[in-house]
Image (cartoon, rainbow, N blue to C red):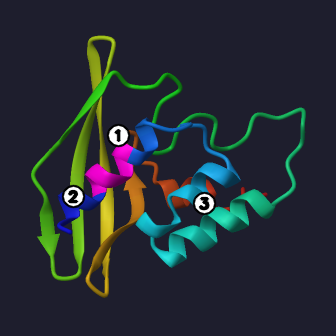
Amino acid sequence: LSPEAAVLELLRQHMTHKMAFTKATAAQKASMLTESLMRAIAAYFARPVSPDEAPVINGDPFTDSQEYPSGFTLGAVLRAGSRATVPVRFDEEGRYKIVEYRLQLSGTTWRVDDLHYPDGATFRGLLKPAKG
């Protein structure tokens, strides 16, 4: 698959199933994510959380939203060797945002390795333990 096809398949699966970020929904995407990213997700879910605090990832990290988008459009891929970036425009009630899907070639398969959000945050950054 091309990087675009890999992102399209992940989003097809994601947007036609439960989109909440849980251990189970992440596991359903395991074949489309790098092993390194899956380890970071597993570590995130293994950390204890206070029931009195909102989770660090409070919403859908794959669309960077609280409300599910009404649609999406893939942008032009930027490929550099075994890495690729696919920008995805998510439409939400007359507004839009672009999330960059960063992929890594794993053998002959493109897998998502990170997401970069419009505010400068990254999925991997959100998965890391809070400092302090």
Q: Amino acid at mark 2?
A: Ala
Category of crowding for the residue at label 2, using alpha-carbon neighbours closer than 10 angstroms: few (below 14), some (14–19), many (at least 20): few
Residue 6: x %, y % from top left = 28, 61
Q: Earlier in the sequence, mark 3 or mark 1?
A: 3
Residue 36: image location, x then y, percent = 53, 77
Foreground: 132 or 19?
19
Residues at circles 2 and 3 in contact by the CB criterion of under 8 Å: no
Compare marks 2 and 3 and give the one earlier in the sequence: 2
Task: Name the residue tied to disc 1.
Answer: 118
Quadrant position of residue 20: top right
Where residue 61 sits in the image (x, y, percent)?
50, 44
Residue 11 drawn in magenta:
yes
> Is residue 46 positioned above or below 99 on the image?
below
Report the residue at 46% width, 68% height from top. Answer: 31
Regarding mark 1 in the picture, which secondary structure is present there? loop
Asked if residue 69 lies left or right of residue 66, the reply is left
> What's the magenta region?
7-12
Q: Are marks 3 and 1 in contact (CB under 8 Å)?
A: no
